[in-house]
Image (spheres, rainbow, N blue to C red):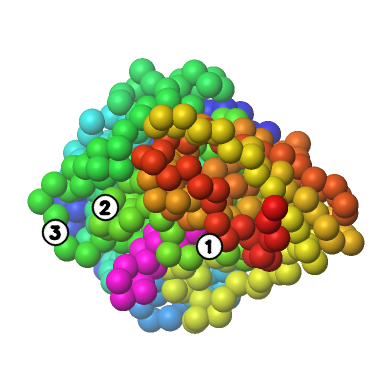
Amino acid sequence: MRPFVKAFAGICSGAVIVAACAMAASAPRASAATLTQVTDFGPNPGNLQMYSYVPASAPAHPAIVLALHPCGGSGPQFYSGSEFAGLADRYGFVVVYPSATHMYNCFDSWSAQAKVRGGGSDPVSLMSMVTYAERAYHGDPDRVYVTGSSGGAMETNIMLGDYPDVFKAGAAFMGVPFGCFVDASDYIPSPGASNCASGRINKTPQQWGDLARAGDPGYTGPRPRVQLWHGTADNLVYYAELQQEIDQWTNVFGLGRTPTSTDTPQSGWTRWRFADSAGKVDVEAYSIAGAGHVLPSTGMAGYAIHFFGLDSGTPPPTTTTPGAPAACRVTDAISSWSGGMTENITISNTGSAAITGWSLAFTLPAGQAITSGWSAAYSPTSGQVTATNLGYNATIPAGGSTSIGFQASQTGDTAAPAGFTLNGAACATG
């Protein structure tokens, strides 16, 4: 498992004053299939380092992907340890790999300067790199994207809030919401010590959304689409952060917290999509059953690039969920009182093969909202809910069962959930 400091990273938020940078017409172009360091890319208040990768397949005006490493890492390490360069070779986009140089090699996502457009610090440095790539590599300013892991994911959310007019979409692997760190005092490199990274900062979706909107307070234009990833067993940047990020970005887009669709594109993955009235998916979230602080793992970068639209419309490969039940049965027991209730759910595998990695989807009656749960990770807390296995109960043997449960508030309707499906297969009840 990575050191805890890799759970943190600063979000880039700089002023687009980079337009004032003097970029020489003879700016060096990264050799095809070679990672190249750029030493003079414009204003650099964060004292960052810039590395760029321009594949041989790059067209005249390529898209640009800003790829941000986790704390404790570097641009060259993220280049060699992730799949983005290989995808760039296949699809012809440029990748910029910055390196942070301070605070455990984390990008600044905690300071007041980082949380506002043009505030200074690392964000301005990162925007300088984007502008450099647009000029030196003739990058398409209408196709600029940002992604990152852990601390780099935290910085990804910052960039999307500070520069909504620059980035068309972003993908954050194991991040926290924009503005989650109050200041550097909560940026503590120890498991469970940070109020932000441990999910102890409670805000309403409106409050989370207001923090992101404050990154560029005068902005009223279209927002970059957001893809979010988290493992259910992450004990460095807690799994609760995924719901907080969902709350933030769905609020920014004016969307409800109930997904418009839920599916399982890979074994152990649950994908929630939040679309507008026209069907455009503005927010997409992935819950990875049993995964710790290890994302992105193999294949996930391809889903990010597909979300960005950089793969020529070719979707990533989808696998059939191993162990998908031929039949399943759900039984429940409810205890209620004025304003509250508990529900214990037993999931039985009545098929002939073991289920390895499961997600149980169901719809809560109106007025019910989960306040706490056990033996599974629940998201969202009302409407169409998905309960995802934890590490210790990921396998349900043929003929076996597992029990989960939750406590909920209610406004009068204490009926059981409806529409139980296990890994996409409908379950019998009773």
Disc 1 secondary structure class: strand
- In primary-sequence order, the first of circles 2 and 3 is 3
Q: How many marks?
A: 3
Q: Which residue is mark 3?
A: 220
- In three-dimensional space, the C-alpha distance between marks 1 and 3, rounded to whole angstroms, equals 30 Å
* Horizontal and vertical percent position of residue 62: 40, 74
Mark 3 surroundings: few (<14), some (14-19) or many (≥20) residues within 10 A: few
Q: Which residue is mark 2?
A: 252
Gap between marks 1 and 2 measured at Cα:
21 Å
Residue at 36% in and 72% down: 280
- Residue appearing at x 49%, y 18% in the figure: 193
For residue 201, above or below residue 223: above
Observer-side mark, 2 or 3, equals 2
Cα–Cα span, label 2 and label 3: 11 Å
> Looking at the image, is mark 1 or mark 2 nearer the viewer?
1
**Where 81 falls versus 61 (above or below)?**
above
Magenta stretch: includes residue 270: yes
Please report whichever mark, 1 or 2, sits nearer to the chain's N-terminal start. 2
Q: Nearer the viewer, mark 1 or mark 3?
A: 1
Q: Which mark is residue 286?
A: none
Is 315 situated left or right of 182 in this image?
right
Q: Is residue 344 visible?
A: yes
Q: In what quadrant of the picture does the N terminus appear? A: top right
Looking at numbered disc 2 in the image, what kind of residue is underneath it?
Val
Could one spot residue 79 in this view of the protein?
no
Which segment did they paint magenta? Answer: 267-284
Amino acid type for the residue under numbered disc 3: Thr
Q: Residues within 10 Å of mark 2 (few under 14, many from 20)?
A: some
> Looking at the picture, how far across and down is residue 4, in whole percent?
57, 28
Residue at image x 73%, y 69%?
A: 320
Find disc 1 in the rendering and name its residue. Answer: 262
